[in-house]
Amino acid sequence: MGYQLYFVVSILSAILLYSIQKIFIYYKKFDDFNHRSSHKTLATRTGGIAVFTTLLIVSSYYYFNSIELFDYSLFIPIGIMFIVGVYDDFYHADFKLKFLLQIIVAKIIIDQGYFISNYHGLFGLYEVPWILAQLTTVFVFLVIINAINFMDGIDGLAITEVIKTIFLLELFSKSQTPLTPLFTLLILCLVPLYYFNFKRKRKIFLGDGGSLLLGTMVSIYIFYLLGDQYVFKKGYQINKVIFGIIVILYPLLDLLRVFILRIIKGRSPFTADQNHMHHLLIKKGVPHKVIVLIILTSSLIAFYIFTI
């Protein structure tokens, strides 16, 4: 992919972000204000819709011109989770239904060749039986997708975390992976969202459609990392399991923390609240941009300590 395409994709994403929001505003489909909201201005949950639409348009162009940028069948699990998220944004789907659909999508991803069959020394295990590999993959998928989803509570945090994760996975790879074109397109789609996400008026949020889309894509890349095809650059001897945990350390720690707090209080771990670490910083008056910078810097420092 050339630089001209990079420019076209980013511009297309920006146009769709603006246009889709205008449509939603026209039909009065705003994001509701409630006790969990971190914003007090008009906003729409259309970021994920614009990002997915951009990916689909660009990929369709290459697909119908018989140019294989990546495995286009990945749009099946990605598309399912995107649709589930969009439905949840507007109709508040039951978490049990979402949980079941997430398991089904995890199985689809496994059948496409992305799964965890090697523990790389974790618990003293390396190659594991097929049934354990599938169960592990489903479990890790559920953890990652919900960790990314729960993290989408303030401006710019989820997209920053995902871009950072992709950057580190690509940076330490010995060569370009089969997923590189797809994730390059994703980053190009996400960058214009920063402007709309941080606007003071008429904000655009990812929404569950966007966060589940990103969570699915991050999961696929983590599964690829833990497979045999991903090889680190010469000079780096890093345990793949540790590397995979560290690149998404903040969402994993935040997920674990809120789950424990909710269970201690006798509530369902899937009950929404404002006990996330970034919410606590908001309550102390820390601006969203500063919180994103703090979390990003802390994540990179932790990554450096554990992997370099």
Image (spheres, rainbow, N blue to C red):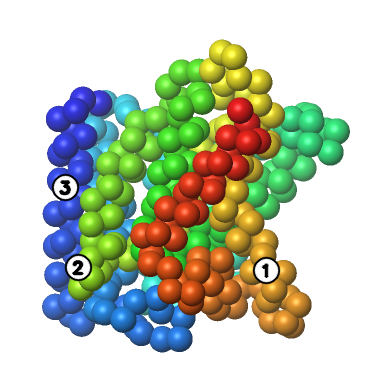
> Is 87 situated above or below 36?
above
Q: Residue at x 60, y 42 (%)?
A: 302
- Residue at 40% in and 50% down: 160
The answer to whether residue 53 shows anywhere in this view is no
Q: Secondary structure at mark 1?
A: helix
The reply, left or right, for residue 69 in relation to residue 105 is left
Single out the mark in the foreground, 3 or 1: 1
Label 3: which secondary element: helix
Please, which residue is most extreme toward the right here? 124
Q: Is residue 126 left or right of residue 16?
A: right
Residue extending furthest top? 234
| Distance Cα–Cα, label 2 vs label 1 | 33 Å
The residue pinned by badge 2 equals 21
Point out residue 174 in the picture as x, y percentages from the top left corner.
Answer: 50, 18
Residue 264 position (above or below residue 252): below
- Three-letter residue code for mark 1: Phe
User: In this orientation, does residue 153 appear?
Assistant: yes
- Dot 1 crowding, Cα within 10 Å, few <14, some 14–19, many 20+: some
Q: Is residue 109 above or below residue 260?
A: above
Residue underneath mark 3 = 12
Q: Position of residue 194 (x, y in %)?
A: 28, 55
Which of the marked residues, 3 or 2, is nearer the chain's N terminus? 3
Please tell me which residue is depicted at 74% across the width and 83% down the height of the picture: 266
